[in-house]
Image (spheres, coloured by chain):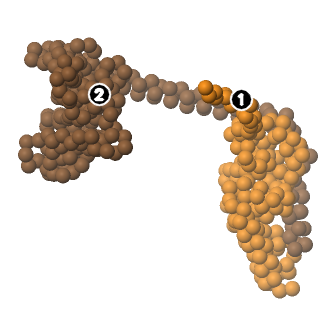
Chain colours: A orange, B brown
Amino acid sequence: MSTKGNGASSRRTRRMRHGGASVAEIEELYRRRFPVFVRTVTATLRDADAAVDVVQDGFALALRKRRTFRGDSNTEAWVWRIVLNVALDHARQQRRARQLERVEPAPAGDDHSTIDLRALVLALPQRQRLILFLRYYADLTYEQIAEALGVRTGTVAATLHSAHATLRRELEEVPR
Amino acid sequence: MKELQIVLDEFGADARVDEANWSDVVARSRRATTGYRSRRTLVLALAAVILISLASVAIAAEFDLLTQQEQFHDRTPDDPARRGQSVQVAASDNWALIAWHSEAGLCLDFAIADNSTFSCGLPVRGAMPAADANERSGHAVAGSISGGNLVGGDGRATIFGATAPEVARVVVELANGRLVVPHVYDAPPNLDAEARFFIARLRLDELERGLDRESPVRAYEAYDSDGRLIERVED
């Protein structure tokens, strides 16, 4: 007579995260990184008043959508994505995005003062500018930036390189 | 570039980094949630209404065609006497394939609103009366085709029939050589039959290209689940 076991002895407990971010997790991120979020959004919108509002709304939205968060990605990158989307929506509503795109670099011949470089940064394409800000203000890794913006990591590296190259070229073309 | 660092510092210089307020975030999320839940509730309610409407239409259509066919056969003296209830085998929004037992064996109706065609005593294993089954071995497949009066509004003719229980696939060879593979259905549990059933709806103009004799069907072929031909029945 042969017997068959029920497999209980070989059963392995497997813990899996089925997704979702906890309130505590989001709150901890908010308390730790609020200044970084606000600074980045302020630079993006060029509006300090709106930036706080956007960050508050962005985190509120993250709280609301926390159950949709996939556990296999980075929580901070996921929140960044939400906050940046709120920021860009706000910019669109206020027509500030168009205004930012229209800023032209200062004409060649001027000294490459700080003001000129500001204009050059503002004249960068939106994605280049966002990646630059996320890298500089938030110190996000390429992978986190990629998740936040929904692009590939290679695209982040290439875009950042392109932004730096553009700024460097423009500065070098300005006679000293 | 040191200049770039200076500029970026300036961009974020007026950021209000001291205005963190988690309670405000929570309050905003609740306000948003209220609206979200309202929208979600509305969407769910609308979806429920649509589903209930569709289900009602489907149930009504099934009931109507079943009732239509039972009343039709009961009122027609020459039709075989029905034994038990009619059962729907397959249906769409404007037709139904209905099976029922009769004194002449298992019958199949293809019905649309206010019209139908039917076939009784299909000589197929699992569909034959017990008395006949003892006398004949029966075929693996047998079919019928709807008349031209049944094309209805969708311009299609219908080939339908029954198969032996072991048949997994039916291929219908039309008179013009075209092969049609109808969908095969199991017998509904409340039919009390071992047979399976098939139906294919065809564009009549496609069918008519092969009409060089009375029946547009040249043969029915029955295959088992391994793809082996069980039987080819010339029509």
Rendered location of residue B120, percent (x, y): 17, 24
Q: Amino acid at mark 1?
A: Ala
| Residue A35 shown left or right of residue A16 in the figure | right
Looking at the rendered structure, the secondary structure element under dot 1 is loop
The residue drawn where x is 61% and y is 26% is: A1
User: Please, what secondary structure does the residue beneath circle 2 have?
Assistant: loop
Observer able to see residue B110: no
Q: Could you say which is closer to the camera, residue B56 or residue B85?
A: B85
Quadrant in which the N terminus of chain B appears: bottom right
Residue at coordinates 18% horizontally, 52% vertically from top-left? B177
Q: Nearer the viewer, residue A120 or B212?
A: B212
Q: Is residue B61 above or below residue A57?
A: above
The residue to which callout 2 is attached is: B195
Label 1 – label 2 distance at C-alpha: 43 Å
Residue B60, located in which quarter of the rendered image?
Answer: top left
Camera-nearest residue between A97 and A58: A58
The residue under label 1 is A8
The location of residue B139, given as percent across then percent down, is 21, 33
How many marks on residues?
2
As drawn, is A4 to the left or to the right of B47? Answer: right
Dot 1, crowdedness within 10 Å: few (<14), some or many (≥20)?
few
Q: Which residue is depicted at the point 45% across and 28% down?
A: B50
Of all residues, the one furthest to the front in this rendering is A1
Q: Quadrant of the C terminus of chain B?
A: top left
